[in-house]
Amino acid sequence: MKKTRVSSSLKKSSLDREPYLYLTTRGRRSGLPREIEIWFVFLADHYYVIAEYPTSNWVQNIGANPEVRVRVANEELSGQARMITDSEAALQQQVQALSRKKYGWGEGLVIEIVPDGAK
């Protein structure tokens, strides 16, 4: 799959129509790739997903290794994932509001995914 900058190849409006993002993490014990299908929002060249439970395996995998792969709208990208902290309440609230608008749900731990090459 080709690796591109999101802002140049995909418009925000097309991402708003995509229901799922496919997130691949590395198993924290096995080191094997683990892919999940998850709701997402896109804001300022970054992807955001919300974990209902901070104890979910994929969240723990990110804690052990923040390098991830993202597949959405026929594009695959590498990136870095991180948990949004309580000190970033404004960003957390903005992401949760976008998720509520798109899906009718937005509660939980917000995870930011910064594609390689994005600022």
Image (cartoon, rainbow, N blue to C red):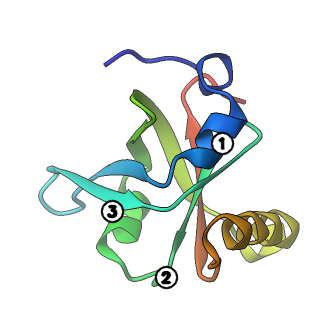
Residue 9 drawn at (x, y percent)? 59, 18
Residue at point 16% right, 63% down? 29
SS label for mark 1: strand
How far apart marks 2 and 1 lie (CA) works out to: 20 Å
Q: Nearer the viewer, mark 3 or mark 2?
A: 2
Rendered view: 4 above or below 67: above
Total tally of numbered discs in the picture: 3
Residue at point 54% right, 27% down? 116
Rendered view: 44 above or below 65: above
Residue 56 drawn at (x, y percent)? 36, 78
N-terminal of the pair, mark 3 or mark 2, is 2
The residue identified by callout 1 is: 46
Residue 34 drawn at (x, y percent)? 22, 55
Residue 52 circle label: 2
Crowding near pointer 3: few (<14 within 10 Å), some, many (20+)? Answer: many
Residue at point 51% right, 17% down? 4
How far apart marks 3 and 1 lie (CA) works out to: 19 Å
How far apart marks 3 and 2 lie (CA) works out to: 15 Å
**Corner quadrant of residue 82:** bottom right
- Looking at this view, is 97 or 110 the one in front? 97
The residue identified by callout 3 is: 61
N-terminal of the pair, mark 2 or mark 1, is 1
Q: Is residue 112 left or right of residue 28?
A: right
SS label for mark 3: helix
Q: Is residue 38 left or right of residue 92?
A: left
Mark 3 residue type:
Asn
Mark 1 residue type:
His
Q: Quadrant of the N terminus?
A: top left
- Looking at this view, is 46 or 68 the one in front? 46
Residue at point 12% right, 58% down? 30
